[in-house]
Amino acid sequence: MTAEKPRAESSHGRPPESLWLATTPETDYEPLADGLEVDTVVVGGGITGLTTADRLTDAGRTVAVLEADRIVESTTGHTTAKLTSQHGLVYDFLTSKFDDERARQYARANEAAIDAVESRIDDLGVNCGFERLPAYVYAASSDDVETVRSEAAAAADLGLPASFTETTDLPYDVPGAVRFDDQAQFHPRKYLLAVAESVHGDGSHVFEKTRALDVDPGDPCEVETERGTVTADDVVVATHFPFYDRNGYFARMHPEQAYLLAVRLRGDPPEGMYYSTASPADTFRPCTVDGEELLIVGGQGHDAGENHPPTSERYRRCEAFAREHFDVESVEYRWSTHDYFPVDRVPFVGRAGPGQEHVYVGTGFKGWGMSNGVAAGEILSELVLTGDSPWADVFDPLRFEPGASARRFVEGNAKVGPTASITTRTATFTPCRPSAHT
């Protein structure tokens, strides 16, 4: 259900456009035409919703995916597309603020997500640039070396393929890094458009331009949309922010914005995927799309309520970093991304709230939505099918971890609360669309 789209010409002066959207056709799934009854409703057509729907249809369940706009165009369409269990410096934190067992669940869920995508790519026979590469978090200064060393030790103790190294393939020296072997990168939209096609049919549906308005968590559940009501045994809310919020997610996450470029280099890009300990962090990774070799470079992350410096300056700083460290020939694409960060650094995946036995949620992927989104889809589908998942405890939306400080969240939320509380609750928040940043 896609329509060919002409490829944009390379021009640094053109409006921001995601590389992933520019190199794939537009979709044209029909909207919901009337009421419908299925086994499960999945609200949201990004990586979490489509992974969940794919697993459920594979198990013989009928599913209706409801997307307010077009699938794989919002957060999932504006990612760096790293598929990795290395999420900055997280494992030393998890073992100290949660416990070893739940930290291990987090690690295993995200490692399994990489394998799951690789397996599904083979099943679908889709060419989406999937490639296994090492991933690094490198110390931006000598002051961060011991922090990076501790992260490597914590991750290795949890069974991850982690090690501390002072050697990288970067064209400049770094004082040390934690390396994760056998991680991956891919073209998320090429992959997920194939997943959507596999979901749509045989009693299951992908509906676009169909905005969910409310959920009745009864028995059965009902999802009210602008175009009719969909009845189901279970509902999975896999939107960027849960439009159906009965568990106070707005009070437990804060939004952040970051900026990305795809640049052409004179010479070869580094072979690994990289993330720095700088504040704000820098991120980059190589990518080949339709025979064109590029380097994705990003950073300048900030709380969504901060408007200074302006967007143009954020892009300029990303470009300055790229040109300082690499031999950049041209900037081919630029776009911004937006995500929600839970106060305790772990996404919310599971039952949406107390007394909602058949309504589930997946949100708060803190900038690592490719692996976390797939892990969420695996967990949510298992909860729907069997009521349990071996990784569910650490992601439980009903958890409370007093050891994880809420100070930074409270400060950030004070900046964006008056605006975001309105827009997210009415499910009209579309922060990642290029038009929002021109």
Image (spheres, rainbow, N blue to C red):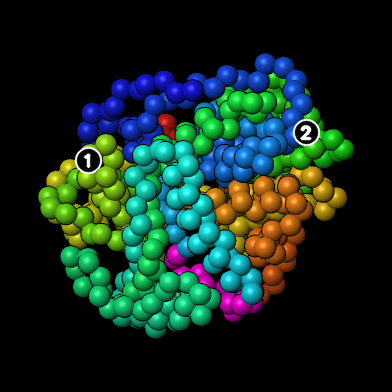
Question: With 120 as the anchor, is 400 left or right in this view?
Answer: right
Residue 395's spot in the image, x, y percent? 65, 60
Circle 2 packing at 10 Å, graded few (<14), some (14-19), many (20+), is many
**SS class of the residue under badge 2?**
strand
Question: Disc 1 residue type?
Answer: Glu
Q: Quadrant of the C terminus?
A: top left
Q: Is residue 362 above or below residue 107?
A: above
Q: Residue at x 36, y 71 (%)?
A: 179
Residue 3's spot in the image, x, y percent? 41, 20
Estimate the spatial distance between the alpha carbons at disc 1 and disc 2, rounded to whole Å: 44 Å
Q: Which region is colored magenta? A: 86-100
Per the rendering, the mark at residue 292 is 1
Q: Residue at x 29, y 61 (%)?
A: 272
Verify CB contact (< 8 Å) between mark 1 and mark 2: no
Question: Disc 2 residue type?
Answer: Ala
Question: With 242 as the anchor, is 317 left or right in this view?
Answer: left
